[in-house]
C-alpha cells in the first residue's frame, strides 16, 4: 500500500472550515484514499473514502487531485468536538482488508 | 453499521499474568481484527481473527504471546500472555461488515502492567 504524508498538527477556529491535506504520491490506480479520525480515548471512526472523484457525506468532503497524488479532507464547519487525530490511509480494495495507520494530523479546534 | 462491545474497558495487571479481552459485535461480520496502540503512538495491527481457524499474525506478533480465538461470526478474544510493562497499551477490536469497506472499532481496552 502507498505511503501517506500528513502534517503532524493543525489548528482551526470553531465554525470555520478545516482543510486537512494528505500526500500520497506513490498511489496506484486501484488504491482508495480513506480518512478516519480518533477522538481522545475512543476507537477510530470512519469518515469518508474515495477513488478518484470528489466525495461528500454528512461528515465531510474529500477532494482528490486529478493526478491522485494528494487529497484534502474538508470539515465545512468545525466544532470543538472535531478535535481529534485524523488519519489518511491509502489502501487497495479486496477481501483481505487491513488498514495501516500512520501518525496522522492532530486537529485542534479552538473556540 | 456495527456496534462493538469490548471488555474490560481498562485493567491494571501484574507482571507475568495474562489478560483476556473480549470483543462482541451486534451482528455477524466477515472480518475481525485486533490492533494495539502504544502510549502516544498510532495503531498497529496485531492479527486478523479468522472464524474457525488460526488467526493470521502480522510481523512482530506471535501466537504464544497474543493467542486469539474467534468461535463464531460475532465474537473474538485476544489474550495478552505473560505480561510485562512493555505490553501497557490500548488494545482495539475492529470489524468489517459485508456491505462496505468501512472498518468499525471498539472503544478499546486500556491495559497497564505493573
Image (spheres, coloured by chain):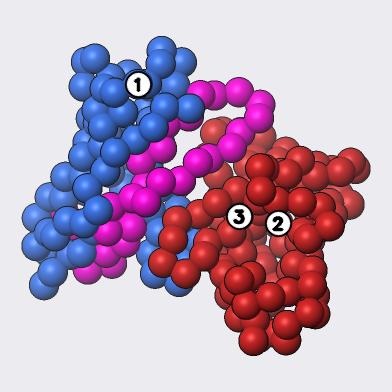
Chain colours: A blue, B red
Q: Residues within 10 Å of mark 2 (few under 14, many from 20)?
A: many
Left or right, B67 with reference to B4: right
Dot label at residue B92: none
Left or right, A87 with reference to A92: left
Pointer 2 and pointer 3 on the same chain: yes
Nearer-N-terminus badge (2/3): 2
Residue drawn 21% across the image and 56% down it = A9
Magenta-span inclusion, residue A105: yes
Chain label for disc 2: B
Tell me the CA gap for discs 2 and 3.
16 Å
Task: Residue A35 in the image: state x and y as whole percent.
Answer: 37, 42
Q: Nearer the viewer, mark 2 or mark 3?
A: 3
Residue drawn 38% across the image and 64% down it = A39
Q: Dot 2 corresponds to which residue?
A: B25
Tell me the CA gap for discs 2 and 1.
36 Å
Task: Residue A54 in the image: state x and y as whole percent.
Answer: 27, 25
- Write down the quadrant of residue A4 in the picture: top left
Check the image and report above or below for A66 versus B38.
above
Segment colored magenta: A77-106
Check the image and report above or below for B30 versus B12.
above
Magenta-span inclusion, residue A46: no
- Closest to the observer, B95 or A99: A99
Q: Are marks 2 and 3 in contact (CB under 8 Å)?
A: no
Q: Nearer the viewer, mark 2 or mark 1?
A: 1
Q: Dot 3 corresponds to which residue?
A: B35
Q: Nearer the viewer, mark 3 or mark 1?
A: 1
Q: Dot 1 corresponds to which residue?
A: A26
Give the SS element for disc 1: loop
Give the SS element for disc 3: strand
Task: Residue A102 in the image: state x and y as whole percent.
Answer: 41, 46
- Closest to the observer, B114 or B47: B114
Give the SS element for disc 2: strand
Amino acid at each position: 500500500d502507498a505511503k501517506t504524508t500528513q502534517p503532524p498538527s493543525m489548528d482551526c477556529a470553531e465554525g470555520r472550515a478545516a482543510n486537512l491535506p494528505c500526500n500520497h504520491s506513490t498511489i496506484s490506480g486501484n488504491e482508495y484514499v480513506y480518512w478516519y479520525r480518533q477522538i481522545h480515548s475512543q476507537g477510530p471512526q470512519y469518515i469518508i473514502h474515495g477513488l478518484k472523484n470528489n466525495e461528500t457525506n454528512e461528515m465531510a468532503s474529500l477532494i482528490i487531485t486529478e493526478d491522485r497524488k494528494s487529497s484534502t479532507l474538508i470539515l465545512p464547519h468545525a466544532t470543538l468536538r472535531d478535535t481529534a487525530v485524523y488519519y489518511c490511509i491509502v489502501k487497495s480494495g479486496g477481501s483481505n482488508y487491513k488498514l495501516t495507520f500512520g501518525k496522522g494530523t492532530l486537529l485542534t479546534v479552538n473556540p | 453499521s456495527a456496534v462493538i462491545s469490548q471488555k474490560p474497558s481498562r485493567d491494571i495487571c501484574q507482571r507475568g499474568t495474562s489478560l483476556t479481552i473480549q470483543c462482541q459485535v451486534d451482528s455477524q461480520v466477515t472480518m475481525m481484527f485486533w490492533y494495539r496502540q502504544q502510549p502516544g503512538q498510532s495503531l498497529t495491527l496485531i492479527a486478523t481473527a479468522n472464524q474457525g481457524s488460526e488467526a493470521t499474525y502480522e510481523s512482530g506478533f506471535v501466537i504464544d504471546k497474543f493467542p486469539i480465538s474467534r468461535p463464531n461470526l460475532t465474537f473474538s478474544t485476544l489474550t495478552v500472555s505473560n505480561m510485562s510493562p512493555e505490553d501497557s497499551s490500548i488494545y482495539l477490536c475492529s470489524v468489517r461488515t459485508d456491505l462496505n469497506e468501512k472498518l468499525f472499532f471498539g472503544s478499546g481496552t486500556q491495559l497497564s502492567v505493573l
